[in-house]
Amino acid sequence: MEFTATMRMTLHTDYALRMLIFAATRRNGTCTVNDVAQAYGLSRNHLLKVAQTLRDLGIVETTRGRAGGIRLARASEEIAVGALVRATEEEFALAECMQAGGHSCVISPACQL
């Protein structure tokens, strides 16, 4: 028997990772949503929501106004990508048993997954 798990990240998580990569590579540490949108050819409106999520998670700091922008709230080495993905994905179940209400697997009582 072969088990294949297919899992895809949402665009929200994908865009969050791209925004972090972009911000981490800026010399002055600050970028704008427009900068990210233009660099990657992404929707500015989607990126605004992503920036808000990252701000709410304490991963970036945002400043409004003419000289405003987005910058990492801490050093890039201190940002755990796995924690970010878990925080931005609504359902991140690798196997059926990890899903809400997914306890129908016959080996669940003995499985240490």
Image (tube, helix red, strand yellow):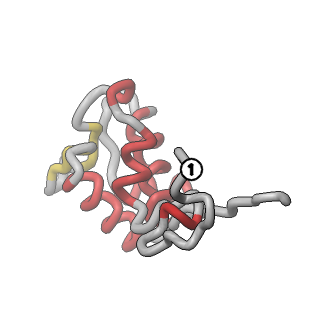
Please indicate whether residue 10 sits to the left or right of residue 32 in the image. right
> Where does the N terminus fall, quadrant-wise?
bottom right
Return the residue at label 1. Answer: 111
Residue 7 location, x and y as percent? 62, 62
Q: Nearer the viewer, residue 83 or 48?
A: 83
In depth, the one of 62 and 100 nearer the eye is: 100
Using the image, determine if residue 75 lies above or below residue 110. Answer: above
Q: Secondary structure at mark 1?
A: loop
| Residue neighbourhood size for the residue with mark 1, other residues' Cα within 10 Å, grouped as few (<14), some (14–19), many (≥20) | few
Q: Is residue 89 above or below residue 81?
A: below
Residue at x 40%, y 70% (from the top left corner): 46
**Residue 10 at x, y = what percent?**
51, 66
The extreme right residue here reads 1
Seen at 45% across and 33% down, the residue is 25
Where residue 30 sits: x, y (%)? 30, 39
Task: Give the answer, above or below, for where 78 lies relative to 41.
Answer: above
Q: Nearer the viewer, residue 28 or 22?
A: 22
Where is residue 18? Give x, y as percent.
Answer: 49, 49
Question: Residue 105 falls in which quadrant of the image?
Answer: bottom right
Please tell me which residue is depicted at 50% across the width and 69% down the height of the picture.
103
Query: Compared with residue 41, is residue 35 higher up or lower down, i.e. above or below?
Result: above
Q: Amino acid at mark 1?
A: Cys
Q: 97 or 73, which lies in front?
A: 97
**Residue 52 as seen in the image, left or right of residue 104:** left
Residue at (30%, 58%) from the top-left corner? 51
> Residue 76 sits in which quadrant?
top left
